[in-house]
Amino acid sequence: MNQAPNVGAAARQFENRGNFVAATPYGSGHINDTFRAVFDRAGAEMHFILQRINHNIFKNPVAMMENIQRVTSHLAAKAAGEPDSERRVITLIPTQDGRVLHVDEDGNYWRAYHFIDNATTYDAVESVEQAFQAAKAFGHFQKLLVDLPAPRLHDTIPDFHHTPKRFAALQAAIESDVVGRAILAREEIEFALAHQSLTSVLLDANLPERVTHNDTKFNNVMLDDATGEGICVIDLDTVMPGLVLYDFGDMVRTTTCPAKEDELDLSKVNLHFPMFEALVRGYLETAGGFLTKAEKQFLALSGKLITFEIGTRFLTDYLSGDTYFKVHRQGHNIERCRTQFKLVRSIEEQQDEMERLVESIQL
Ligand code: ADP
Ligand code: GN1
Ligand code: MG
């Protein structure tokens, strides 16, 4: 999985698009390897998104692709007839022999998507309007999947948002301290351990299971370059049964603070209330019609929970020697953990006001 793969050979496996020119790393995801593959077809440039799936993390790529195929077909059927419909749903490109995955001689799994042109993903939110658009798009995505026909989707990664189990994994990592880093993370460990009671709040609330995205970070929605509209939800690897609050919580985590996830200046890491308000309004505009009262009641709290959960995961990975998330420098995971825990603190300071806002919008 770690050795440099032959990207060009993989790109050529997909439906004939002309002569292969180049494939360059693309985006800033933490898990898979994403490339923009360029082809020349009779002098015209064609390009598509090529991804090597991290099969250490996604243990069953075939089941994952089955989920993605079912979900994208359902979404495409609903988008048909809308203006610009082909830019509203990601579309898989089949291999030359008609499959959705290419497995190379080293056992790497590859897939390809049509490139959504004239739209951009951002690693950090820049405006209230962007927050509104992102939440509206993710709410719309959930809404369109409310009537996804049975059977239940596969659990791509079991217990992905089971926060108590994530917490237990952290406790185990502190206990074994395999790379001797616990001493360097004393404050973060203390912060995490003091928040144990938060971990089970959503699981205890008896909320309905739905089809959810589960990775609604801001750079997983493409915003149209001309209109700013949240035109396409991408990164469907973790679409599976879940709680809508996992999705809303991750929007709060990534789309209420203009600082990046690995910002070093923690004074820049705060929840911006107008962005939170835009998220709630955008999300309820599309999802408000199907959500239950109980689900709406947890909107404000879900942000704190998911931000804490992801912070816990970064901390666990730091203590485990950086085996899960891609890191680009020494200490990257603890830096990411610090921004998450700082944001949790900022949310805690504004929690009452956030609750009041959610209540007032629902009335
Ligand atoms: P990861 O799972 O590693 O986060 P993503 O599926 O989110 O991978 O892709 C990484 C980046 O590639 C995205 O943030 C986006 O900028 C770009 N991207 C992904 N799919 C498309 C697409 N279909 N069209 C255009 N850009 C895309
Ligand atoms: C990972 O793949 P990417 O970068 O969109 C992770 C998410 C985390 C996120 C933190 C499969 O998402 O769960 O919230 O990093 N994806 C997986 O930035 O673990
Ligand atoms: Mg992504």
Image: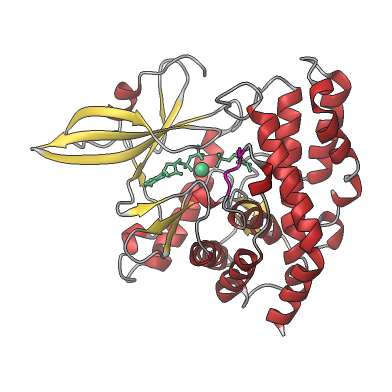
Near-viewer residue (7 or 310): 310
**Up-down relation of residue 171 to residue 71 (above or below):** above
Give the percent coordinates (x, y) of residue 230.
44, 62
| Span highlighted in magenta in the image | 259-263
Q: Is residue 178 visible?
A: yes
Name the outermost residue toward the left. Answer: 42
Answer with left or right where residue 95 lies relative to residue 236. left
Give the percent coordinates (x, y) of residue 181.
78, 19
Give the percent coordinates (x, y) of residue 239.
58, 50
Residue 93: image quadrant is top left
Q: Is residue 160 visible?
A: no
**Secondary structure of the magenta portion, mostly?**
loop
Give the percent coordinates (x, y) of residue 145.
55, 63
Near-viewer residue (343 or 33): 343
Looking at the rendering, the quadrant in which ligand 2 lies is top right
Residue 262 falls inside the magenta stretch: yes
Q: Residue at x 74, y 58 (%)?
A: 302
Q: Residue at x 56, y 68 (%)?
A: 143
Residue 126 falls inside the magenta stretch: no
